[in-house]
Amino acid sequence: MDRNETQLLLMMLEQFYPNKKFRDPKALFSAWALALEPYDFETVKRAAADYAAQNKFFPDLADLTAALPRRKAPVKPQRDDTELLRRLLNSSGDCNA
């Protein structure tokens, strides 16, 4: 999920729980955006709606994500730092690599 989708989710939850007040809404948003990043928006939205239909209290993040599949994080290509390391060692005079 991206930050816009997190905002939409929290707005939806505010409709389900209109009396819920947050001590620090900005901190809540930032924490939820970070924690929900690996999840698909539509899946989390459905989980939130299902949760709200059965619970009268505002959910914790774990209430929504416990059974959700995480999207696979993109695999970052590994850098070959051999050449960089060789140049650093040569410039320091510590090695004749």
Image (cartoon, grey):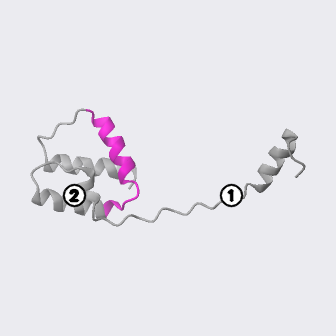
Element at label 2: helix
Residue placed most toward the observer, 78 or 92: 92
The residue positioned 31% from the left and 47% from the top of the image is 7
Q: Per the image, is 10 magenta?
A: no
Against 2, residue 67 (above or below) is below
Residue placed most toward the observer, 57 or 42: 57
Pick whichever of labels 1 and 2 is earlier in the sequence: 2
Under mark 1, the amino acid is: Arg
Mark 1 closeness class: few <14, some 14–19, many ≥20 residues within 10 Å: few
Where, by quadrant of the figure, is residue 90 drawn? top right
Against 15, residue 22 (above or below) is above
How far across and how far down the image is residue 69, in percent?
A: 34, 67
The residue positioned 12% from the left and 49% from the top of the image is 57
The residue positioned 73% from the left and 54% from the top of the image is 81
Residue placed most toward the observer, 84 or 25: 84
> Label 2, on which residue?
48
Measure the alpha-carbon separation of dots 1 and 2.
Answer: 39 Å
How far across and how far down the image is residue 76, in percent?
A: 58, 60
Apparent side of residue 77 relative to residue 81 in the rendered image (left or right): left
Looking at the rendering, the stretch of residues picked out in magenta corresponds to 24-42
How far across and how far down the image is residue 32, in percent?
A: 33, 47
Mark 2 closeness class: few <14, some 14–19, many ≥20 residues within 10 Å: many
Element at label 1: loop
Where, by quadrant of the figure, is residue 72 drawn? bottom left
Q: Quadrant of the N terminus?
A: bottom left
Magenta span dominant secondary structure: helix
> Label 1, on which residue?
79
